[in-house]
Amino acid sequence: MIETVLSGLRVIDLTQNVAGPFCTQVLGDFGAEVIKVERPGRGDDTRDWRPPEIAGQSSTFVALNRNKRSVCIDLDKPEGVALLRQLAASADVFIHSMKPGSAEARGFGADDLKAVNARLIYCAISAFGQTGPLKNLPGYDPLMQAFAGVMSVTGSEGDDPVRVGVSLIDIGTGMWAALGIFAGVVERARSGRGSVIEASLLDTGINWMTVFVASYLATGKLPRKMGSAMAMTAPYELFHAADGQVFIAAGNDGLFRRICQGLGQPGLADDPRFATNPQRVANREVLRAAITALTQALPTAEIIDRLRRAGAPCSEMHDVAQMLKNDQVEASGMIAGMPIENAPDHKVVALPLRINGRRDHALNPPPGLGADTAQVLADAGLTSDRIAELRAGGIIG
């Protein structure tokens, strides 16, 4: 990888599934050396999440594990735990996604590892957090969308609650964990000491509900499911066109006036029912009907052209294929080439940041299970004879 902000940082990664691997992939994209510790013979659960597949590999695993090295160690055996502690002694970051108490019971909790490496940044990702009556329960993204109330505000009124299609709890938890680790790196540079970082799916789910919690606490009324609309502004939702749908968003009164101009009805902005945002919210249904009467007679491309020329916020309703073909997406550089064996044209979603005008495209494909075990252990000081002995004993794979 090219030199970037985390070059030289070594991460020991005991996570699997989505949240933890997304976090460590972010660290790897920033240049960290990520050593993914997996179970011999099986590895990360997502290696088996297929179909769909890319060149015989789980597409989910490929999407979440680039820029990493794979080491197989049996952590159910004391010799395996000893190896892990040896790796952690020279690492900068240690991250796991085991249930609370499991790492401590095995001898690699935060206190155990910081005793041999005071500069270690230790991060634990869990479902419900490290405290509380539910701390030992497992959790997955849709479960937490239900628990935190995200599903209660997703979908259309009168319909059953709907899961948000993207794994926003998992991905969000990975982002928060990465942010916490960055904070730990900054703190260590200042104080010379490591940190203990905690992230959980529940905390992330509650955080995503910030605006809805504020609304409920202000009014005592439960937020409604509103389809594509938003409770506090109007218009701010999908509208039907003659051949599809467009999203139209008026974040303020001036933008609403531009929308009306773009749709050829400037007088609509002067209607006293729609003059201010609170009035538009109060008369949402009448406003929706008035705008729909204009949009449903026009093709999507014409609506978008008119509104953009008027300076009004809008968007086509894309599916994944349409999004990937869009000129702006191509210009963004967010879709980058990452050739893998038997799939030389494979592409991935890149890190959504530019630093000094550059997006890091030095992308290394996900590792084969245990592909780096011997080299990583040799780098840690083990002899070839000792590595062979550990392999023969089933401690490593």
Image (cartoon, rainbow, N blue to C red):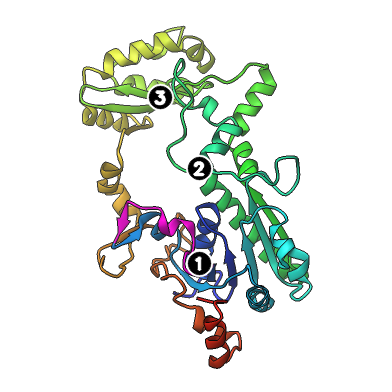
Q: Position of residue 139 (x, y in %)?
A: 59, 44
Image: 52 above or below 157 = below
- Disc 3 vs disc 1: which is toward the camera? 1
Say whether residue 51 is magenta.
yes
Question: Is 167 rendered above or below residue 61?
Answer: above
Q: Would you call the spot at circle 2 few (<14 residues within 10 Å), some (14-19), or many (20 or more)?
A: some
Percent position of residue 199, x then y: 65, 51
Q: Which residues are magenta?
A: 38-54
Residue 44 visible in rendering: yes
Q: Secondary structure at mark 1?
A: helix
Q: Which residue is mark 1?
A: 28
For the residue marked with disc 3, what is the amino acid? Glu
Residue matched to label 2: 168
Q: Real-space Cα distance between discs 3 and 1? A: 37 Å
**x and y percent of residue 133 in the render?**
75, 40
Identify the mark nearer the N-term, 3 or 2: 2
Instruction: Say which residue label 3 marks.
Output: 237
Residue 348 placement, left or right of 384: left
**At 57% across and 76% down in the image, what residue appears?**
395
Residue 287: which disc?
A: none
- Amino acid type at image mark 1: Gly
Residue at x 63%, y 16% (from the top left corner) = 221
Residue 62: percent from left, percent from top: 39, 60
**Kind of residue at badge 2:** Leu
